[in-house]
Amino acid sequence: MLKTLFAALPLALALSLPAAAQSPYPDHTIRIVHGFAAGGNADTVSRIIADALSQDLGQAVIVEARPGAGGTVASGYVAQQEADGYTLQLLVGGHPVAAALYNSLPFDSLDDFTFISTVGQFPFFVGAQHGRFASIQEVIDAARANPRSIRIGHAGVGSTQHLTGELLGLETGVQFLHVPYQGGAAATTALMGGEIDLVIDAGTVILGQADAGVFDALAVTSGERWDDRPDVPTLAETVAPGFDVLSWTGIGAPAGLPADIAETLNAAVNRALQDEGVRERILALGASPVGSTGEEFRAMVERQIATWTRVIDAAEIERR
């Protein structure tokens, strides 16, 4: 009897050990979900981080696109997944915009997510046809003299680009005419054809045309001049003191992720962002590789929800 009892003890002890002790994280494939079309910037950033995490953590990391509704389809899906570290999400700057814009979402943009780390940040640039305006101050003067005479094209009502233009109007006390298009490329084409006066969009949209002499980059939305374009003045130093808008990408997970797994992932993401190869690939997309703590990431999202809520209210944009 005693012999049988002692023989059973190792098995009983093994069964009583926490699962994490038996299978250290991670022990199988991790997914990074994003909410946009395959081949776009979100997909590219996801794959850059997936490659780096796979090498760091020693497990396959795959990318899964679940496009729709500006990323909210993916967010709704991820929010419902198990918080075990095997389903992650590439969150983007549209995440706080959606929280401010939609009357009802199938998730809470803060409380249904664990914020792990930012990945990259990028500003928008104000672009105009080459020679159309001498400076951003000239644009504001023209808009002030003739309200709604300056037409700003953007990638759709409620897009981050649209709200950035609305914020510029609020901060400078002028009224622009905002013209929505089906994406940034369509707005850029309209600017080339003279249908609109300005476009506010990412450097990947504006700067190539500026380098070709087609557009002028009149200003950048970041609080400080952007390293890649130190010759482009900020809105803050010219027409709107304190103006500072950066869009971003970051890694999140469902709410309730165990602290030790969140710490493992945060450390891995931040190590990746120190790798020269990873940095070069992110810089090539017009973004600056910037990591953070989970707490810093969440606080940034919370601030942006408040900012975009204020802009939507002030501009009387209809919520969806």
Image (tube, rainbow, N blue to C red):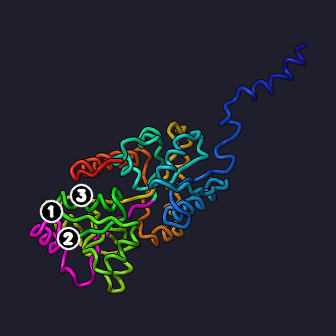
> What is the number of the mark on residue 167?
3
Instruction: Determine which residue is flagged by label 1.
Output: 174
Which circle, 2 or 3, is nearer the viewer? Answer: 2
Tell me the element at label 1.
loop
Name the quadrant containing residue 166. Answer: bottom left
Measured from the top left, where is residue 233 in percent x and y?
23, 72
> What is the number of the mark on residue 150?
2
* For marks 2 and 3 on the same chain, the one whose residue lies earlier in the sequence: 2
- Is residue 107 visible from the viewing direction of this image? yes
Q: Which residue is drawn at 56% across and 39% down?
A: 83
Relative vertical location of residue 41 with respect to residue 68 in this rendering, above or below: below
Q: Which residue of the protein is positioned furthest toward the bottom in this rendering?
A: 213
Q: Which residue of the protein is positioned furthest toward the top in this rendering?
A: 1
Q: What stretch is highlighted in magenta?
A: 120-149
Q: CB atoms at circles 2 and 1 under 8 Å apart?
A: yes
Residue type pointed to by label 3: Leu
In the picture, measured across the screen, residue 223 lies left or right of residue 105, that is left
Q: Residue at x 48, y 67 (%)?
A: 282
Residue type pointed to by label 1: Val
Q: Give the crowd class for mark 3: few <14, some 14-19, many >=20 residues within 10 Å.
A: many
Name the quadrant containing residue 62. Answer: bottom right
* For marks 2 and 1 on the same chain, the one whose residue lies earlier in the sequence: 2
Relative vertical location of residue 244 with respect to residue 281 in this rendering, above or below: above
> What is the number of the mark on residue 109?
none
How much space separates mark 2 and mark 1, taking CA atoms? 10 Å
Q: Residue at x 59, y 56 (%)?
A: 64
In the picture, measured across the screen, residue 262 lies left or right of residue 148, that is right
Q: Which residue of the protein is positioned furthest toward the left in this rendering?
A: 145
- Is residue 232 visible from the viewing direction of this image? no
